[in-house]
Image (cartoon, rainbow, N blue to C red):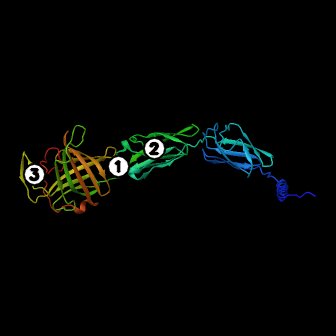
């Protein structure tokens, strides 16, 4: 009887054992996604569906595919494919069995949304109101605002564009038409209207002069020097300062108790401790921000209001072509008559201001 080697017996056992192991029949696509654009497809009943953003080019998309353990897929994961038509993917299990999946890519229709969602003037900390029914955008700005170069920040519907663009300095002296173009190319227009505040009487009360600056300007009105002369006053010092009084009936007084001298007939007359009161009538042009003061001695001043709040304003008075007086005033009373001087000397006829100046020292 022949002897059987131990090695032969072990090898035979191993072959029998391995032949008894069953190969996997798993052949599922577990996930199917695109990196660019980043979209995860849905998988149901061997149907793969990916919905892409509008405008996506589907002729060269690269899918990343994961399948069952020990299975393979054809076309392979990472292989670019043209998805203008459904693409078939065959998954082969370890045991050689197969399953076929159909991958479909759907591109969203381009949006027709074309709304202006907000319009804001950051420099004024102001949001405009938008009436969607009339397509009107309205904003009310302080009356001294330069509306010829306002910069709006505008938000529109996702995928839409706007002309004029957000962040572009725009002249709002007249209504501005904004055209919004949706993703699908359809358009709509809005009208933006900026108006200035029109208070009944922004100057009513008593105002004290804080500072006077005098400087030369060039032909375009730009300062040649920072200041030729500067005078400072306590606006609340009624006994030693300069005040302008504005009443509801459009009349007013200019009180000047700071004068040490006055200019009469080409020479100075010293007038210590004298309060000069000059009467005037006034009007205000809201559109141009010009305060007109008609003095009782016959001269009219057109004062350009360059800054204004409820408690202060700044005007510029251009004497002639090359000389400007700039005055800073602060409200010291909202009731004109309460701070009226108890006595004054009205020297309207004999008092002569230096030519062209309202408050010239």
Q: Which residue is mark 1?
A: 143
Callouts 1 and 3 close, C-beta under 8 Å:
no
Quarter holding the N terminus is: bottom right
Neighbour tally class for label 1: few under 14, some 14-19, many 20 plus, Cα within 10 Å? many
Tell me the element at label 2: loop
Q: CA distance from mark 2 to mark 3?
A: 55 Å
The reply, left or right, for residue 52 in relation to residue 257 is right
Specify which label sits upstream in the sequence, 1 or 3. Answer: 1
The reply, left or right, for residue 143 in relation to residue 345 is right
Q: Residue at x 12, y 55 (%)?
A: 259
Residue 3 picture quarter: bottom right
The reply, left or right, for residue 174 in relation to residue 346 is right
Q: Which residue is mark 3?
A: 262
Q: CA distance from mark 2 to mark 1?
A: 24 Å
Number of numbered discs present?
3
Tell me the element at label 3: strand
Tell me the element at label 1: loop
Camera-side mark, 2 or 1 = 2
Callouts 2 and 3 close, C-beta under 8 Å:
no
Q: Give coordinates of residue 237: x percent, y percent.
A: 19, 62
Q: Which residue is mark 2?
A: 166
Q: Give coordinates of residue 344: x percent, y percent.
A: 14, 59
């Amino acid at each position: 009887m022949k002897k059987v080697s131990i090695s032969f017996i072990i090898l035979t056992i191993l072959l029998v054992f391995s032949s008894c192991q069953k190969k996997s029949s798993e052949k599922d696509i577990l996930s199917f996604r695109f990196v660019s654009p980043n979209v995860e497809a849905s998988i149901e009943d061997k149907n793969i569906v990916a919905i892409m953003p509008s405008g996506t080019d589907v002729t060269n998309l690269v899918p990343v595919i994961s399948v069952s353990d020990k299975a393979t897929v054809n076309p392979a994961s990472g292989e670019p494919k043209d998805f203008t038509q459904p693409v078939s993917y065959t998954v082969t299990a370890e045991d050689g069995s197969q399953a076929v999946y159909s991958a479909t890519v759907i591109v969203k229709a381009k949006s027709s949304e074309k709304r202006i969602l907000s319009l804001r003037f950051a420099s004024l900390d102001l949001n405009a109101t938008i009436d969607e029914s009339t397509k009107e955008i309205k904003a009310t700005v302080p009356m001294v605002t330069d509306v010829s170069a306002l910069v709006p920040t505008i938000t529109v519907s996702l995928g839409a564009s706007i002309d004029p663009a957000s962040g572009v300095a725009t002249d709002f002296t007249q209504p501005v038409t904004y055209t919004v173009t949706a993703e699908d190319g359809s358009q709509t227009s809005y009208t933006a209207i900026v108006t200035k505040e029109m208070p009944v009487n922004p100057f009513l009360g008593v105002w004290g002069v804080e500072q006077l600056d005098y400087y030369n300007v060039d032909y375009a009105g730009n300062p040649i020097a920072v200041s030729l002369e500067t005078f400072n006053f306590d606006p609340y010092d009624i006994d030693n300062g300069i005040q302008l009084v504005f009443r509801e009936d459009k009349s007013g007084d200019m009180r000047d108790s700071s004068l040490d001298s006055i200019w009469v007939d080409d020479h100075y007359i010293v007038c210590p401790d004298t309060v000069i009161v000059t009467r005037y009538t006034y009007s205000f042009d809201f559109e141009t921000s010009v305060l007109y003061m008609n003095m009782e001695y016959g001269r009219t001043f057109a004062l350009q209001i360059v800054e204004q709040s409820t408690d202060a304003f700044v005007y510029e008075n251009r004497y002639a072509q090359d000389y400007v007086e700039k005055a800073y005033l602060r409200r010291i009373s909202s009731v004109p008559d309460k701070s009226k001087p108890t006595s004054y000397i009205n020297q309207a006829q004999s008092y002569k201001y230096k030519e062209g100046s309202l408050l010239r020292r």
